[in-house]
């Protein structure tokens, strides 16, 4: 529309293809290729193999996938409950308190993840709150980091919700708890699922706080990818990264389908 | 008197439990986030016996490792954000105004990068631009060079390029939303009146995109200052940023107090940028 001549448009599309190819397509393609590479001495791999996948499947991969999924699920579920709770009850506050409290729930997303981990180490390394070295501290770190995103998503959903349904429910005599369970939450459901999916994906890729607090027996996917590549085993690292990407995408697509079916769109 | 109370009381009693419902999630966040944050500040300023520890703070803030990390962090963040803004604007303009078959799918594909772990890009860059990577192997074979000619990956430029890839989608999304609101009739009118595409971009589209650029840019500054995975995975000795320094001091050297002092600086920087982002996004109406 902006460029009318055919040649001008072609030049612009070539520029776009170059930027997109170099910045976005090449990294994804090369990770996939290297996870399947037999040996790689020249420009392209000498051959293809699924050996790296077999290796990581024999090694730490299964435990890492389990640690990441369990941590992601627990942290996202807690963040969903607390974020929804916070967003719903913030609506009942006066405007001054709302302006004060709202940003406080967003601040965890602004603080560097390493510092969140450091804070947890400093705070919970002594009795009575001795959590250092437990699985719980990893989940808490993930919860803190993703809580702002769930809160933000649910708040955005609430803001778009038409108040009519709730008012009608009230005027028909629905009690607050009944109204919440049968009117507000079902209307919010697409946003809740989206919030859960986003926070799960963020948790799956979290590295900064995890690397500060993880106990020896609970190595998540990103941490175990780092220790593989740090040891120089970059092909196995690439294979494990592909597993992480696949797990994340399957999860997001699955949740998207659930939402689409639920809302009938 | 009693009547006034009778009228006033039910509303007060009705509102009280509703207002208190904010307490559980707020208390959870206070215990798990704000309390540890306060302890970082405490540990940074006081030593074990609870006395203010000024000499140690001065020593850390004047140390070469801290100043280097601070300069690296700011340089990388500003350069990467500038890169994200340029690439994001270019991609958004093409996607919105010179669309091609499948451009919607491409926009969604770029969007999924938001959900992927940041270190993926660094790992990929090792295979692409590392000393034994595809680019160097290709150039060495083609021109029979004895040494790998491309050597930017293990410098600040490697980090900057990786961060541009990772954070451009964060700019692209609000930008596409903002420029899709530009009146097409205005562009066509300008075009019929003989304005060249560059002038249309500068005088019609850019003014509409400025709020989104400011909001996206300040979000990028914040995210790049806080970035950890990319820098850790590149693992270059010369490229240490504040988050990486905190990790090194706390985990590798067990120097918790030094780590806390640096963390206070890093957190203050991040919160400042967060304020800037909220201000910019607030004006944008996000």
Image (tube, rainbow, N blue to C red):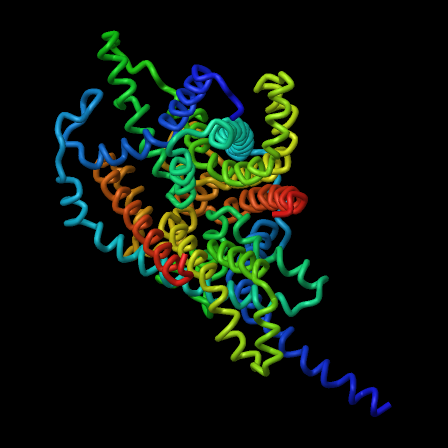
Question: Is residue B75 at least partly visible in the picture?
Answer: no
Would you identify the image quadrant in which residue A88 lies?
A: bottom right
Frontmost residue, A242 versus B226: A242
**Residue B70 left/right relative to A260:** right
State the residue in front, A89 or A6: A6
Q: Residue furthest bottom?
A: B2
Q: Is residue A89 something one can see in this rendering?
A: yes
Q: Nearer the viewer, residue A11 or A124?
A: A11
Task: Report x, y in % for residue A231.
Answer: 25, 37
Instruction: Give the answer, above or below, for where A16 lies relative to B17.
Output: above
Work out which residue is located at the far top of the displayed protein and give it.
B143
**Residue found farthest to the right:** B1
Residue B41 placement, left or right of A58? right
> Is residue B256 found left or right of A99 in the rendered image?
left
Q: Residue at x 29, y 50 (%)?
A: A247
Count of numbered marks: 0
Quadrant of the snapshot with the C terminus of chain A: bottom left
x and y percent of residue B175 in the render?
55, 36
Please state which of residues A170 and B266 is positioned toward the viewer in this rendering: A170
Which residue corresponds to the image point at 63% horizontal and 75% vertical from the top-left? B18
Residue at position x 42%, y 46% in the image: A208
Instruction: Place residue A171 in its image quadrant.
Output: bottom right
Against A92, is B126 above or below?
above
Image location of residue B189, percent across then percent down: 63, 25
């Amino acid at each position: 529309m902006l460029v009318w001549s055919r040649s001008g448009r072609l030049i612009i599309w070539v520029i776009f293809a170059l930027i997109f190819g170099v910045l976005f397509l090449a990294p994804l393609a090369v990770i996939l290729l290297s996870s399947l590479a037999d040996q790689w001495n020249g420009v392209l791999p000498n051959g293809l193999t699924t050996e790296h996948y077999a290796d990581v499947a024999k090694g730490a991969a299964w435990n890492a996938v389990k640690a990441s999924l369990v941590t992601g699920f627990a942290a996202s579920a807690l963040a969903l409950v607390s974020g929804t709770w916070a967003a719903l009850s913030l609506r009942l506050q006066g405007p001054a308190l709302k302006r004060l409290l709202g940003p406080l729930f967003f601040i965890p997303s602004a603080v560097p993840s390493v510092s969140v981990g450091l804070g947890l180490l400093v705070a919970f390394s002594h009795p009575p709150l001795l959590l250092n070295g437990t699985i719980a501290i990893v989940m808490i770190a993930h919860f803190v980091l993703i809580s702002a995103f769930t809160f933000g998503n649910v708040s955005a959903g609430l803001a778009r919700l038409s108040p009519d349904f709730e008012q009608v429910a009230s005027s028909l005599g629905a009690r607050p708890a009944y109204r919440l369970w049968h009117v507000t939450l079902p209307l919010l459901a697409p946003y809740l699922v989206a919030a859960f999916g986003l926070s799960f994906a963020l948790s799956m890729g979290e590295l900064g706080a995890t690397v500060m607090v993880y106990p020896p027996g609970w190595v998540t996917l990103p941490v175990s990818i780092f220790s593989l590549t740090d040891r120089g085993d970059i092909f196995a690292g690439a294979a494990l990264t592909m597993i992480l990407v696949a797990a994340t995408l399957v999860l997001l697509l699955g949740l998207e389908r659930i939402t689409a079916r639920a809302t009938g769109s | 008197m009693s009547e006034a109370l009778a009228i006033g009381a039910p509303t007060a009693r009705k509102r009280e439990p509703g207002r208190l419902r904010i307490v559980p999630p707020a208390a959870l966040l206070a215990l798990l986030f704000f309390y540890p944050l306060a302890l970082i500040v405490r540990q940074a300023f006081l030593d074990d016996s609870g006395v203010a520890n000024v000499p140690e703070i001065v020593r850390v803030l004047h140390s070469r490792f801290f100043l280097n990390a601070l300069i690296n962090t700011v340089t990388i963040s500003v350069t990467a954000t500038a890169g994200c803004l340029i690439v994001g604007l270019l991609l958004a303009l093409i996607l919105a105004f010179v669309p091609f078959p499948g451009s919607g799918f491409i926009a969604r594909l770029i969007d999924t990068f938001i959900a992927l772990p940041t270190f993926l890009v660094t790992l990929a860059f090792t295979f692409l631009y590392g000393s034994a990577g595809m680019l160097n192997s290709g150039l060495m074979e083609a021109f029979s060079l004895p040494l790998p000619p491309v050597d930017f990956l293990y410098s600040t430029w490697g980090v900057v390029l990786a961060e541009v890839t990772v954070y451009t989608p964060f700019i692209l999304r609000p930008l596409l939303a903002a420029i899709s609101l530009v009146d097409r009739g205005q562009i066509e009118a300008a075009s019929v009146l003989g304005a060249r595409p560059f002038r249309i971009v500068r005088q019609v589209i850019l003014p509409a995109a400025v709020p989104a650029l400011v909001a996206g840019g300040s979000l990028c500054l914040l995210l790049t200052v806080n970035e950890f995975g990319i820098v850790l995975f590149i693992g270059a000795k010369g490229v240490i940023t504040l988050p990486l320094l905190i990790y090194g001091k706390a985990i590798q050297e067990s120097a918790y107090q030094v780590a806390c002092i640096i963390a206070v600086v890093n957190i203050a920087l991040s919160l400042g940028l967060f304020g800037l982002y909220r201000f910019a996004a607030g004006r944008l109406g996000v």
